[in-house]
Amino acid sequence: MQLHATIPAPNGAHACLALYDVCPHTTYSTASRYRHPYLHCDLPSPRSTSNPHSIEYINKDGTRIVETTHSTLSPDPGAHRIHAIHHIDRKARKAYDSTYDAISTIQHPKEKAMAASLAKLVLSKHSPMMHHVRSPASEPPPLRSILKSTRPLETMPTIYLLSFSTDRAPTTKHFARLLNDHLPSGVPLRYTIDARRFLVPSRQIQDNYSGVAEITQDAVLRDRGARREIEHAVHELMGFVQDSSCIGGGRETAIAVCCTAGTHRSVAIAECVARGVRQRVRRAGEGVQCKVVVRHVHRIKGIKDPF
């Protein structure tokens, strides 16, 4: 399941939040403890200015207001300062103060910074104190943001397979960061395969190999549940590939696989799914093609691994 929410940004653009219910290794009670259990969020990067920027405008009742802005989306509540004010609407000021009073109750510093940023987006729509604020950026946006926003469209259906460790990504917040770092912007995640319920390879295999080795994959495939999960994923992804080929390509999708260490079972499942899709595409003949990208986020290379 995937939900989208659009929030107006101060520069007239929109920030899009995508929420995924695809994190099986965290319980609902764990996820519900977070005020913002968002996954794969695309928000504008914070921008700073070296010189303050003043804005002068007339309110509805004819009041002259002068604002000085130091940052567009700074988490610091003091970033927007009003230096010369003859009169401010009391209701607007009360709404502004109550918003930051609510933010002050958040204890975690990262959550507090995010809440403050989102509060400014909301205030820019409802409070006359934040209307028409423009602040030129003196620093260019991060290179990663430029690459993700300007990347060329894929010419064929593309499948992303991610393997990761639940020990290193135990919560929805960690999972959100993982998706943002390892999936291109806008790629939907279908679901996550929880490989922790499958058979664990022997200690000898674990000490010498990771999931990219055939000996590890053979050990995992002894589990009937693992074979059934792989067949289901390959069947679903082939349906995606064939639909995309008929439409003309350019679509993308992703499946994640998790296990405790992110080195053996999850890696083996992801590799088997990728191999199954490639074999089925080759057998389908001309007119059916796809690109498969496999990323093992937390894999530790074994001393006898082929690569």
Image: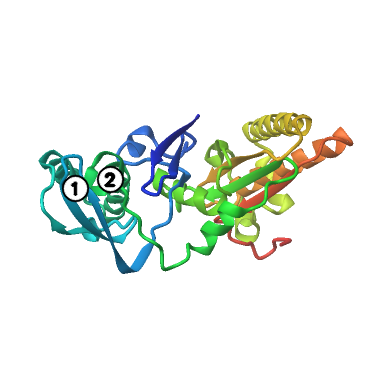
Looking at the rendered image, the quarter that the C terminus falls into is bottom right
Point out the residue furthest to the front here.
62
Q: Name the spot of residue 159 as percent of width and height, x first.
A: 68, 42
Residue at position x 55%, y 58% in the image: 146
Q: Name the spot of residue 269 as percent of width and height, x first.
A: 65, 43
The amino acid on which the numbered mark 1 sits, given as a three-letter code, is Tyr
Q: Name the spot of residue 201 as percent of width and height, x first.
A: 62, 47
Q: From the image, tell me which residue sits under label 1.
A: 100
Q: From the image, tell me which residue sits under label 2.
A: 119
Asked which secondary structure carries label 2, the reply is: helix
Q: CA distance from mark 2 to mark 1?
A: 8 Å
228 left or right of 175?
A: right
261 left or right of 53?
A: right
Asked which secondary structure carries label 1, the reply is: helix
Q: Earlier in the sequence, mark 2 or mark 1?
A: 1
Quadrant position of residue 224: top right
8 left or right of 269?
A: left
Q: Nearer the viewer, residue 16 or 30?
A: 16
